[in-house]
Amino acid sequence: MTIDSIEDPPSTAVEQLERFGLSAYAARTFVALARLGSGTARDVSQVSEVPRTRVYDAIDELHDQGLVDIQHSSPKRFWAISSETASRTFEHELQRRTEILRTALDEIEPAQRRAEQRGVWTVNGETAITNRVLEFFASADDEIVYMTVEDLLTDEVIEALGETADRGVSIHLGGVSQDVQDRIQDTIPGATMFESLWVWSDTAAGRLMMVDGEKTLVSALVNGAEATRSDPRSETAVWGEGDTNSLVVVLKAIFTWRLDTGEPK
């Protein structure tokens, strides 16, 4: 995801630094030094509204994490590392924590997951739904049927479909324009295209998918074309798994009928 601009960079930077674990004073101090280039405790206090007596505590916190260098002059001066170096530092820390989390979860997870998740499950948010879709792709052995609006058919999804096809899984796609179909054909030459069951632009549909006739997912969009900054687009999905799952049975019947009677494009 590319972020073109941020309305309030200082506040956003402070918020993100706090999410990475810095105290509020340390986050404000770092942002102040990033704006100043270098400065004394007095300079930082004037720019950041951090009490001067607390600047030194914040500097110690930042210095311990390698985010600030100290010049032992009179008065002491402080220098913040570059935005690129700071971002790289937090990225490495995030990767480390993610790896620790993955290892811990692997050790507490059952040796074998239940073969079937009974019932219908909900998932909210485009990112979370995409992650679930990618998980389903990775689990596919024989066939994927996937219908979607163009905005949700991202490069990440197309790349994952291509990797799945390379494993010998059959890919059937519907609900996308001719331009998108041409792009997919370049990445996944063996993919089969079929006509959508309806005009997607006239509905709130987001995605419909079936994997190996045993896993299905359906999502709907809220504020598709009408999304605004104050009322952004959102996506909600339901998914089910298993031969006797009601959602699987219904969508399997629909997809089987469509693929058996529709002419591939």
Image (cartoon, rainbow, N blue to C red):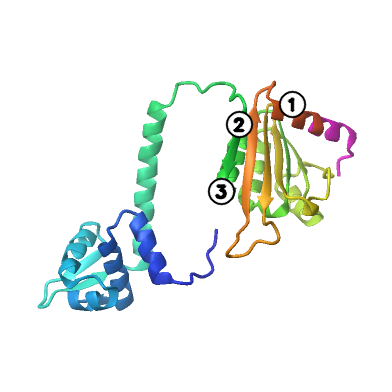
Q: Position of residue 22 (x, y in %)?
A: 29, 57
Position of 259 relative to 8 (above/below): above
What is the spatial separation of the Cα atoms under label 1 and label 3, in whole angstroms?
Answer: 26 Å
The disc labelled 2 sits on which kind of residue?
Ser
Depth check, front residue: 65 or 23: 23
Crowding around mark 3 (Cα neighbors within 10 Å: few <14, some 14 to 19, many 20+) is few
Residue corresponding to mark 3: 127
Q: Residue at x 60, y 59 (%)?
A: 232
Q: Nearer the viewer, mark 3 or mark 2?
A: 3
Depth check, front residue: 106 or 251: 251
What is the spatial separation of the Cα atoms under label 1 and label 2, in whole angstroms?
Answer: 19 Å
* Quarter-of-image position of residue 118: top right
Q: Nearer the viewer, mark 1 or mark 2?
A: 1
Q: Position of residue 32 (x, y in %)?
A: 30, 73
Residue corresponding to mark 2: 139
Residue corresponding to mark 1: 249
Q: Position of residue 137 (x, y in %)?
A: 63, 36
